[in-house]
Amino acid sequence: MKMSVTRGLAELKLLDKRIKTVMNSAAFVDFAIGEKAVNGYTSNKEYEDKVQSAYQSVKDLMKRRNDIKSAIVLSNAMTRVKIADKEYTVAEAIERKTSIQYEVQLMQKMKNEYTKAVNNIQRINEEVKEELN
């Protein structure tokens, strides 16, 4: 079955929610006292069947999620895009977005240090002028 990356990303979000919902709503471990059934169930078999069903549901959802995620990663590694006259794979473009943030942070740090140095020089120059007067 073919699926667009956009559709795959949307389905990943949906699968994440469904996995969390099933995991949060299911009680995978419980206990019974003596011959009584697990609390809230008419028989231990009913409880075991419900747990098995919830477990299988989560495993199926996780497998589907992994399959879609793998396909998206593969697509991102193979699909090429052109950005500002330079060609990248989608994976490289996504990573470039992250690395640009580091460059922006470095530039801001350097600007702040430059401003601090200029202010110190101006302060020292003012102090020297006052001493000369």
Image: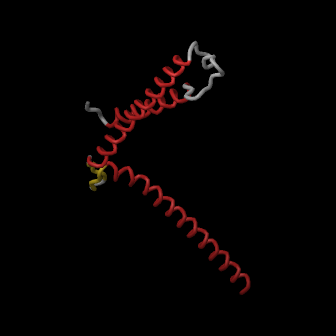
Q: Nearer the viewer, residue 17 or 107?
A: 17
Q: Residue at x 37, y 33 (%)?
A: 64
In this rendered view, identify the residue nearer to me: 62 or 116.
62
Q: Position of residue 66 (x, y in %)?
A: 38, 38
Q: Quadrant of the N terminus?
A: top left
> In this rendering, would 38 be left or right of 1?
right
Query: Is 15 or 56 nearer to us in this picture?
Result: 56
Q: Residue furthest bottom?
A: 132
Q: Is residue 84 above or below residue 30?
A: below
Q: Residue at x 47, y 25 (%)?
A: 52
Name the side, left or right, on which 44 lies relative to 15: right
Residue 76, x across and y down, in percent: 31, 46
| 67 sits left or right of 34 in the view | left
Q: Is residue 82 left or right of residue 25?
A: left
In the depicted structure, whether residue 18 falls above or below residue 116: above
Q: Position of residue 89 (x, y in %)?
A: 29, 51
Relative to 73, residue 52 above or below: above
Q: Which residue lies at the image location 55% right of the left edge and 28% below the top edge?
A: 28
